[in-house]
Amino acid sequence: MSERKRLVLKIGSSLLANTDHLTLRYAFMHGVLSDVAKLREEGTDVILTSSGSVAIGMSVIDADPETAGILDKQAAAACGQPLLMNAYKQIALEYGFDIAQVLVTLEDLEDRRRFLNVKNTITRLLENGVMPIVNENDSVTTQEIKVGDNDRLAAKVAQMIQADNLMILTSVDGLYDRNPEDPEAKHVPVVEDVSGYLDVTDSVSALGTGGMLTKMKAANMAQNAGVTTLIAKGENEAPMTAVLNGSRRHTRCVANGDPDSSWRIWLTDRLQQAGGLTVNKEMAEKLRDKRTSIEGSDLVSIQGEFTKGDVLHVYDEDGEELARGMTNFTSAEVMLLARNPGEDPESLLGYEVKPRVIAADNMALIQDHHLTWEAPTDEMKLVS
Ligand code: GLU
């Protein structure tokens, strides 16, 4: 039997909910699931990342999307998610397949063990021919601990299951080189490097949370993992197949042909920044060359409060990001090690340790194709 392909489809809120009445757009959902059925028959498994729970739930709790606060959104998501899933289930059964709900939080993607748990669940569903429908568990997450947008969430899923394609259906037919309302704006059919478009893409749709900026960030994550992203307008008629066969205009963000290992991809493509380390000149030089374990004595400062197992961003003294890696210690322990370079780490920490803050094996170097992050400004603690 030949290998089945995998496609992650992301559908935005503006396609699923009527802007005026905040009710479901059934005709569009029929179009999507009929296309999914076709693709499944032709050998492609689809994993859906669906927004819409917040928008659909708004009318149930009598809230206005324009003024809704975080509590309203959490409650709306709790009302909207079952409505959404009920509709998907009914329609999918008409096209001969079943669906399942997978709700995740930021931590399920940022913590390695939980990430692998989600991966196993999705893989198990696919093996049984059930289409997973993934969304953020908005009812239990607050602003600070949210993924926030389903574009990057879908990209994470695409990385997780090593998809061939990520398709993002939205209200515009792809990326433009400036605001699409500008008469001079030109459609961009192919993107190799998203970094040139980050300034021109910071606009957000009326109902969703992500704009073109989050789509470009998502496309970059997908590219890094060898996944091609297709961004297109979601039409009722053949919403997916018309894009895949090239008959509908879209933007194609081309996959990196030589992706890193899935471990290093997971290390580099973060959704939130847990903390940072600034290393001295000697260590910065070494890291420009190759992965090298970082010890307390290599540090100039640390940023943020982090815990063992968090992925930290590593900077040189000019703020250039050099690497990302998993810390073996909490921020308090790193401070102790860094402030007492001559002392025995075991007597400092009270347990047996190798004094490597980040081991070379748990590190990925930043390369040209990665989008870098600024060092966190909070709680810059200088090592004395
Ligand atoms: N998780 C949100 C929802 O279901 C959508 C997030 C987004 O718009 O990207 O409504």
Image (cartoon, rainbow, N blue to C red):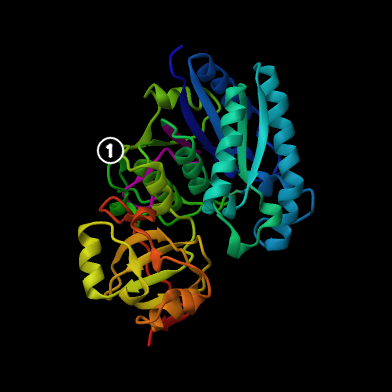
In the displayed structure image, the side of residue 60 where residue 7 appears, left or right: left
In the displayed structure image, the side of residue 35 where residue 62 appears, left or right: right
In the displayed structure image, the side of residue 22 where residue 201 appears, left or right: left
Count neighbours of disc 1 (C-alpha within 10 A) and say few if under 14, some if 14 to 19, many if 20 or more.
few
Residue 180 visible, this angle: no
Q: Residue at x 65, y 20 (%)?
A: 97
Front residue of 254 and 324: 324
Magenta stretch contains residue 106: no
Say above or below: 340 vs 255. Answer: below
Q: Residue at x 47, y 51 (%)?
A: 211
Q: Quadrant of the C terminus?
A: bottom left
Residue 297 visible, this angle: yes
Amino acid identity at mark 1? Asp
Locate residue 214, reporting x and y percent: 45, 52
Q: Which residues are magenta?
A: 165-181
Report which quarter residue 303 is drawn in: bottom left
Q: Which residue is mark 1?
A: 258
Front residue of 102 and 29: 102
